[in-house]
């Protein structure tokens, strides 16, 4: 269970972007979060992935409340998440080859020995040809780089996937291919998914359940009242 | 008949790389764009769409080699015009650009208002007491909220930055507007508003070349659609026929449309070829289930506007409700 409880977060304590937002994703469930540009949904996705510390509220990952954020998050919690961002160019180190990019989480967690085994496998899953793996980000297209970023998010076999506008930069065919790769991984691993975006048609086709940004605000009170009413 | 606003004739762009290799980014593009018309150029990332736009503005890097011609209504060839002509009479005045990444296009150290005012001064000759009002009017035209005029580009969301860039592009009232992925990162409602505004700006006497990977945006405003694959235009069709009945005729274009989430949502198998190592024949043959030996030779973009030896003839399935 991934629980976001009454989160308030932002970049200025006086003017938080996210105010009192709650959302729960069940294990293996796929939830699409819809909201207009600039509503704070990307900030919420960052908090959910333990990448941004909220001002108030709690993130509970599989029953355990998160206490650290970014590099201070305990490794077991940090590696439970795979994150794919909107802009592959901004989320890929330009100095790394695609193989190194995909393998980086393995190296960072002391599992460099697994690189040979995992990377070719994953490259196939996301549809990257072996000829591309030796290239650096500036030598591949946005679509190809995003495929590598998805492979990187899957390399530690996360229990939770957070996709923040993963396909907003991509054409229809690459979008369908990346969504298919995510779903293939989920079917095999049982990972849960929080997909954030503004494309209603896409998220409704992709996810089991979609929620509107507006429904989440103050949702904690609703959830607390329900058991009491029984 | 009046002359087209833009006439692209056999335009090719290739980049010289280290080691004497070449990357063919645009090969033999041909199309006309009439006044009052909107042509959507669609295709996946890396197919050469944006290079075509850069060529039309004379913004190609040093190592680019061009061939063919791109003529404006008055006969100016955009490929051979010198930098002085391009800078003083073409960019902004006769060809307006709505850029792909507004965050990189806007000057980071100046407010949106100051950038609007500068553009108004330079392109429209507006002078001081009227400048403030004109800047507000220009912002409103692109639905940029007036309360954000005194903000710097980094203080704007992606959608607002895009609208600021659109406002700047519309100021010169250029007869030809190039919109290079104007809707990337915007939500559907904003996409609709942005493209509607572009369409409205086109009216009857201007023309719009909309470069996009967003097929829904293309469907909304385009009169004609050109599909680009691996540096070539592989299909040009009327938008009604392309998105409705009988649907795209090139197997790639058909696959692209069927990849949409409200249609089959299935990707085209495989990946596009490298632009540095294009095959002799049809570049799509390796991914195409209709391909046979005939596809080893390059198909010409023949009437009715499909470059394929085995065009699809079956009707397209309608999108799901």
Image (cartoon, coloured by chain):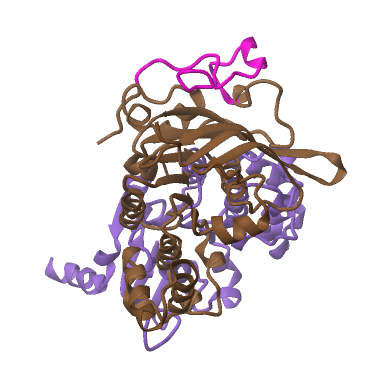
Q: Is residue B202 visible?
A: yes
Determine whether B52 is above or below A95 in the image. Answer: above
Q: Which residue is at 44% across, 40% downward?
A: B40
Q: Is residue A64 visible?
A: no
Determine whether A92 is above or below B212 in the image. Answer: below
Q: Position of residue B214 (x, y in %)?
A: 43, 45
**Residue lying farthest top?**
B293
Q: Position of residue B288 (x, y in %)?
A: 56, 22
Residue B297 painted magenta: yes
Corner quadrant of residue B228: top right
Q: Position of residue B189 (x, y in %)?
A: 30, 55
Q: Which chain is purple?
A: A
Residue A221 painted magenta: no
Looking at the rendered structure, the number of numbered marks drawn on it comes to 0
Q: Which residue is at 23% across, 68% downward?
A: A223
Magenta residues (range) = B287-315
Determine whether A229 is above or below A155 in the image. Answer: below
Depth check, front residue: B35 or B37: B35
Q: Which chain is brown?
A: B
Determine whether B85 is above or below B165 in the image. Answer: above
Corner quadrant of residue B242: top left
By secondary structure, the bulk of the magenta-drawn segment is best described as loop
Q: Which residue is at 50% across, 47% downward?
A: A170
Indicate left or right for A136 with A92 as reference.
Answer: right
Q: Position of residue B16 (x, y in %)?
A: 78, 43
Depth check, front residue: B19 or B139: B139
């Amino acid at each position: 269970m991934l629980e976001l409880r009454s989160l308030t977060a932002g970049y200025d304590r006086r003017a938080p972007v996210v105010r009192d937002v709650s959302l729960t994703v069940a294990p293996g469930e796929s939830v699409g979060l819809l909201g207009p540009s600039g509503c704070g949904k990307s900030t919420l996705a960052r908090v959910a992935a333990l990448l941004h510390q909220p001002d108030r509220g709690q993130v509970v990952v599989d029953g355990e409340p998160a206490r650290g954020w970014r590099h201070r998050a305990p490794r077991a919690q940090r590696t439970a998440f795979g994150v794919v961002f909107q802009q592959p160019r901004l989320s890929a180190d330009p100095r790394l080859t695609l193989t190194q990019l995909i393998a980086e989480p393995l190296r960072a967690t002391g599992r460099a020995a697994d690189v040979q085994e995992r990377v070719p496998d994953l490259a196939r899953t996301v549809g990257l040809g072996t000829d591309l793996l030796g290239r650096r980000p500036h030598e591949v297209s946005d679509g190809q780089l995003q495929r590598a970023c998805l492979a990187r998010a899957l390399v530690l076999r996360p229990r939770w996937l957070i996709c923040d506008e993963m396909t907003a930069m991509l054409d229809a065919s690459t979008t369908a291919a990346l969504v298919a790769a995510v779903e293939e991984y989920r079917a095999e691993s049982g990972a849960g998914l929080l997909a954030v975006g503004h494309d209603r048609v896409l998220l409704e086709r992709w996810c089991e359940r979609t929620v509107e940004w507006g429904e989440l605000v103050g949702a904690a009170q609703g959830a607390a009242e329900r058991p009491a009413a029984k | 008949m009046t002359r087209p606003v833009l006439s692209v004739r056999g335009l090719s762009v290739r980049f010289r790389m280290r080691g004497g290799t070449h990357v063919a980014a645009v090969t033999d593009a041909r199309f006309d764009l009439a006044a009052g018309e909107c042509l959507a150029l669609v295709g996946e990332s890396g197919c050469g769409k944006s290079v075509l736009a850069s060529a039309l503005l004379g913004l190609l890097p040093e190592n680019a080699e061009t061939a063919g011609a791109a003529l404006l209504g008055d006969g100016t060839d955009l490929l051979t015009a010198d930098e002085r002509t391009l800078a003083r009479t073409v960019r902004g005045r006769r060809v307006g650009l709505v850029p792909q990444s507004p965050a990189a296009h806007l000057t980071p150290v100046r407010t949106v208002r100051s950038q609007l005012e500068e553009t108004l001064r330079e392109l429209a000759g507006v002078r001081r007491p009227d400048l403030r009002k004109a800047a507000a009017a220009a912002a409103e035209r692109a639905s940029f909220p007036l309360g954000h005029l005194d903000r710097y580009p980094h203080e704007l969301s992606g959608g607002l930055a895009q609208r600021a860039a659109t406002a700047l592009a519309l100021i010169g009232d250029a007869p030809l507007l190039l919109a290079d992925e104007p809707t990337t990162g915007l939500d559907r409602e904003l996409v609709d508003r942005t493209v509607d505004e572009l369409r409205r700006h086109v009216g009857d006497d201007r023309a719009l070349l909309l470069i996009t990977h967003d097929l829904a945006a293309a469907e909304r405003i385009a009169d004609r659609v050109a599909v680009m694959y691996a540096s070539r235009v592989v299909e040009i069709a009327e938008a009604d026929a392309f998105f409705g009945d009988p649907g795209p005729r090139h197997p790639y274009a058909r696959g692209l449309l069927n990849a949409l989430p409200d249609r089959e949502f299935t990707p085209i198998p495989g990946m596009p070829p490298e632009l540095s190592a294009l095959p002799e024949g049809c570049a799509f043959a390796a991914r195409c289930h209709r391909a046979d030996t005939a596809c080893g030779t390059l198909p010409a973009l023949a009437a009715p506007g499909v470059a394929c030896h085995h065009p699809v003839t079956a009707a397209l399935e309608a999108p799901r409700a």
